[in-house]
Image: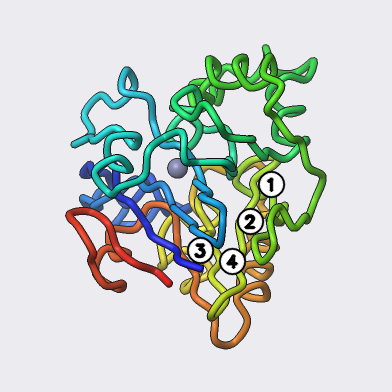
Amino acid sequence: MKVHALCYGRRMGRRGQHFHGYDEDSGLPHDTAYFVWLVESEGHTVLVDTGMRPSRAGELEYRAPVSLLRDFGVAPEDVDLVVLTHLHYDHAGTVADFPGARFVVQRSEVDYWTGPWAKRIERERWLLDSESLAWLVESDRLSLVDGDEEVLPGISVHLVGGHTAGMQVVRVAAPDPVVLASDASHFFENLEDDRPAPLIHSMPGMYAAFDRITELAGPGGIVVPGHDPQVLHRFPPVADGIVRVA
Ligand SMILES: [Zn+2]
C-alpha cells in the first residue's frame, strides 16, 4: 500500500491559532500547510479529505486538489473512496470533483452540523463547508459510519472526536502502520507536547484523541498531522508539494 501527502496550500498563520492557551509566543508567525492524503492499495484509490474549494482559498497559496492529483497521475474518476476526516471547509471542500467515489463520514459529524442546535453555533459555522454538507446529504454515495470501521482491507477509520464532534482519523495497515491524524493533531507539536489546538469541541476528547492516535500507530507506526509543513521535510519528496509517507 502506498501513502502520499499532497500539500494543496500554504499560508503564514500565528502560533495562537494552533496552540491552546495564550502565551508570549502566541503572536509569533507560524507556517501552516494544507493537505489531502492519497492511499493506493490493490484495486483501490482512496483520497483522505478533499481540501478547500477554490472560492474559499482567500489568502492561501493554493493549488486545487484535483489538479494536484491530476499532475500526479490520478484522475478524479479513479478515486473510488473518499474519507472525510471532518466537515471543516479546508477538508471537505471539493467533494463534487470526484464522480465515482463513495464518501465515508462519521454520523456524529453530520448530526452535529444538521441537529436542532446547528443554527445557534454561528461562531463556529464558518468552519463548515455547508455546500458540501448539503451535497453529501442529497447524494446516494454518502456512507455514514459510527465509531471504528474497516472501510477497505487494511484501511480503517476511527472516531476520535475532540476537534469536532465526529472527527475521525485513518489508519493504513501496511507496511508499518500509518495514522493520518488530520486535525486531531494539526502539527507534530500538538501530539508531541500534549498541547491541543484552540478549536475545541471537547477538551477531554482532544486528549483522548492524542492517546488513541498513539495507540493506533503503535511502537513502529507513523503519525501524519493535518497542517504541519514539516511533513514535507520528514518524508521523501516525490514531486513539488508531494511526499511519500509509506
Ligand atoms: Zn484543517
Q: Which badge, 2 or 4, is on the more N-terminal residue?
A: 4
Percent x, y of residue 114: 73, 19
Q: Which residue position holds label 3?
A: 195
Residue type beneath disc 1: Ser
User: Helix, strand, or loop for circle 1?
Assistant: loop
How far apart are the two marked residues, 2 and 1, measured between alpha carbons? 6 Å
How far apart are the two marked residues, 4 and 3, measured between alpha carbons? 25 Å
Residue type beneath disc 4: Val
Q: Is mark 1 within 8 Å of ligand 1?
A: no
Mark 1 or 4, closer to the camera: 4
Disc ID at residue 206: 2
> Do residues under tags 2 and 1 come within 8 Å of each other at their CB atoms?
yes
Q: Which badge, 4 or 3, is on the more N-terminal residue?
A: 4
In the depicted structure, whether residue 30 falls above or below residue 70? below
Q: Which residue position holds label 4?
A: 172
Q: Which badge, 3 or 2, is on the more N-terminal residue?
A: 3
Horizontal side, residue 103 vs residue 199: left or right: right
User: Helix, strand, or loop for circle 4?
Assistant: strand
Residue type beneath disc 2: Met
Disc ID at residue 142: none
Residue at 52 percent of width and 33 percent of height: 88
Mark 4 or 3, closer to the camera: 4
- Label 4 packing within 10 angstroms: few (<14), some (14-19), many (20+): many
Residue at 33 percent of width and 43 percent of height: 69
User: Helix, strand, or loop for circle 2?
Assistant: helix
Residue type beneath disc 3: Arg
Q: Which residue position holds label 1?
A: 202
Percent x, y of residue 215: 67, 76
